[in-house]
Amino acid sequence: MAIDWVHAWPTALAAFLASIVEFVEALTIVLAVGATRGWRNALAGAAGALAVLLAIVLLFGPLLTRIPLRDVQLVVGGLLLLFGMRWLSKAILRSAGVIALHDEDEAYGKQAAALGTGGGGRLRWDAVAVTTAFKITMLEGLEVVFIVVAVGAGGAGLLVPASLGALGALIVVVALGVALHRPLSMVPENTLKFTVGVLLSAFGAFWVGEGIGLDWPGGDWAVAALTAGFLGLSVLAVPTCRRRAAALRPLPNL
Amino acid sequence: MHWLGTVLRELLGLVVDDVGFAASIVAWVGAAWLVRAYGQAGTTSAAIFLFGGLGLILVESVLRRSGAPR
């Protein structure tokens, strides 16, 4: 089936941006495992998890096409709305300085220290290292699968562009990881999460609306209006949250 | 079965970390469905009702958490 990219590109972009954040988090831990316990163990764990995730997508992706589209839009749109608004609220609080920014260098250091430099040597399998790489790739990858299935379930033929967006993110992150051999701390993670939170909230609201029988004014263009609405609200909320947090912060003892 | 519990917790954690926030969103979607199904509102009004409520829930949540003791 030919892909209508005029309608599919926002789906691919949302999946790409959301997936890149998750892949960066997984890469940080896989790099820590590789650097401390050997690359063979780290890559085997990550590859095993990717194979399981691919099997999940191949199993559950086609199943979605058997359920009436309106039901899928309501359920998946609802989950996407919960996921996107949760992500967006955290991104607002991080931008306002209310909660701390995620630090990939710190995560890398903590994981490397926890793993130490032990293990079974470069030529033997190291169960701890393989399991750690498998677990983090599996957990972050499950989030990617959820995002791909959720943003791809909004209409016929959107699963392929969503998958291509996630695949593009994987290629970009792996290429950067191979080139740099260190955590991708220069990725503006909160800006990405802010953007993705806005996009996922807009997609979620749109599909929930379709699922409950709303005919959005402007048809598919309503997604753009919802994106602008969530973005505007969020940008306005940041300074208000910052002022509120500052007003409630205790004064230093003089 | 420990791993299964971890996976389920992670999956639930994807969509719910503040129960009140998540419940408000679900309740508002339910309210929008009621307005659409049984109310006199037109489709544009119902769309504005859905987005407006979601926006208020988001702003209320971040303002509440900004004021919470840390």
Image (cartoon, helix red, strand yellow):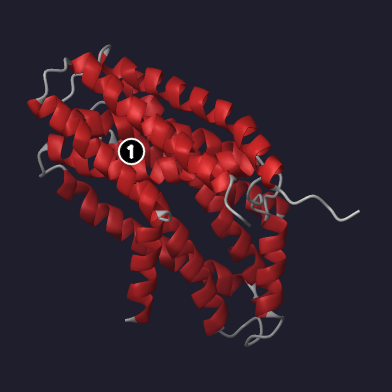
The N terminus of chain A: image quadrant: top left
Residue type, numbered disc 1: Val
> Which residue lies at the image location 26% right of the left edge and 53% below the top edge?
A58
Q: How many marks?
A: 1
Q: Nearer the viewer, residue B9 or A232?
A: A232
Point out residue B16 in the picture as x, y percentages from the top left corner.
Answer: 38, 54
> Which residue lies at the image location 47% right of the left edge and 44% below the top edge?
A87
**Secondary structure found at label 1:** helix
Q: Nearer the viewer, residue A189 or A160?
A: A189
Taking the view exactly as shown, the residue that stands out farthest to the front is: A254
Horizontal side of residue B32 vs A237, given as left or right:
left
Taking the view exactly as shown, the residue that stands out farthest to the bottom is: A120
Tell me which chain the residue with mark 1 is part of.
Answer: A
Point out residue A79 in the picture as x, y percentages from the top left corner.
Answer: 30, 46
Compared with A54, A30 (above or below) is below
Graded by Cα atoms within 10 Å as few (under 14), some (14 to 19) or many (20 or more), the crowding at tag 1 reads many
Q: Is residue B19 in view from this perspective?
A: yes
Taking the view exactly as shown, the residue that stands out farthest to the top is: A218
> Which residue lies at the image location 18% right of the left edge and 17% below the top edge?
B43
Q: Nearer the viewer, residue B4 or A206?
A: A206
Q: Which residue is mark 1?
A: A151
The quarter holding residue B50 reads: top left
Taking the view exactly as shown, the residue that stands out farthest to the right is: A254
Compared with A196, A35 (above or below) is below
The quarter holding residue A243 reads: top right
Point out residue A167 in the picture as x, y percentages from the top left corner.
Answer: 44, 44
Compared with A23, A160 (above or below) is above
Q: Is residue A145 in view from this perspective?
A: no
Point out residue A120 in the picture as x, y percentages from the top left corner.
Answer: 62, 88
Q: Nearer the viewer, residue A177 or B50?
A: B50
